[in-house]
Image (cartoon, helix red, strand yellow):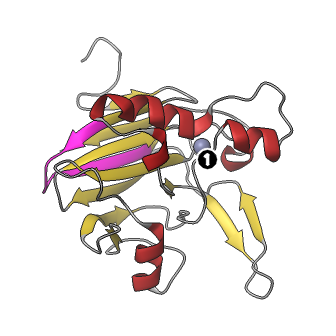
Amino acid sequence: MPHDGLPAGIHEIPPRSGVAFTLEAGQVLTVIDPRGEQVADLLAFNRHDLDEVISSGRTLDYASRLFLTTGDPLYSNRSNVMLRIVEDQVGRHDFLLTPCSADTFRIIYGDTHPHRGCFGNLADALGPYGIGPDRIPIAFNVFMNVRVDGDTGALTVAPPLSRAGDYVRFRAEQDLVVGLTACSALQSNNHSFKPIHYRID
Ligand SMILES: [Zn+2]
């Protein structure tokens, strides 16, 4: 048993924080919601060419759907598959909205001293890999439950459908630098901040 008390191979992202790590092509990343109703923002960059990055626009265009699940590929800006969802216990995630940020909290919540959010956490974690904040695109927001009104296009951020222990597994189709957070936005996480767990196999 590791010293932090987690099962072997499980890493914890504390509430309102983020990490970055590398994946080899063929490795599988499991993103786990240990307590339920907690979002994790996921970013991916080509480790050998950081100008290639995960693309919401390309992925949704090719899927012709807003909601992605088992079997769906996540494409890069160059239309290569970066990750593929190989198992999904929840079936509702978001790929429309940018990582929450100090600006999000200022503009949407009216905070005068805003938290840096997933955006700041991702920028901090990805910095050592040579990835600056202006390169951060829309993340694949694991477990985020954004409802879309089909007629007006109105967006509603609802509590995640994930329950304690639910997970999503992604297979890396390239060598990647990955950023991953335990999201910091009140609305996205049903008003409480919880950790995210992950493992790499
Ligand atoms: Zn967030």
Q: Main secondary structure of the magenta part?
A: strand
- Horizontal arrangement in the rendering, residue 113 relative to residue 13 (left or right): right
Q: Quadrant of residue 197?
A: top left
Give the vertical position of 61 relative to 6 (above or below).
below
Give the vertical position of 189 relative to 88 (above or below).
above
Residue 186 in view:
no
Q: Position of residue 65 (x, y in %)?
A: 51, 83
Q: Quadrant of residue 58?
A: bottom left
Report the residue at 56% width, 39% height from top: 118
Q: Quadrant of residue 174?
A: bottom left
Q: Position of residue 167 (x, y in %)?
A: 41, 52
Q: Is mark 1 within 8 Å of ligand 1?
A: no
Ligand 1 quadrant in view? top right
Q: Position of residue 95 (x, y in %)?
A: 52, 65
Give the vertical position of 145 relative to 200 (above or below).
below
Total labels drawn: 1
Tag 1 residue: 37
Q: Position of residue 11 (x, y in %)?
A: 33, 30
Report the residue at 43% width, 61% height from top: 89
- Horizontal arrangement in the rendering, residue 45 relative to residue 101 (left or right): left
Quadrant occupied by the N terminus: top left
- What secondary structure is marked by label 1? loop
**As rendered, which of 5 and 153 lies closer to the eye?**
153
Quadrant occupied by the C terminus: top left
Report the residue at 72% width, 59% height from top: 157
Magenta segment range? 21-32
**As rendered, which of 92 and 122 lies closer to the eye?**
122
- Amino acid type, mark 1: Glu
Question: Is residue 26 magenta-colored?
Answer: yes
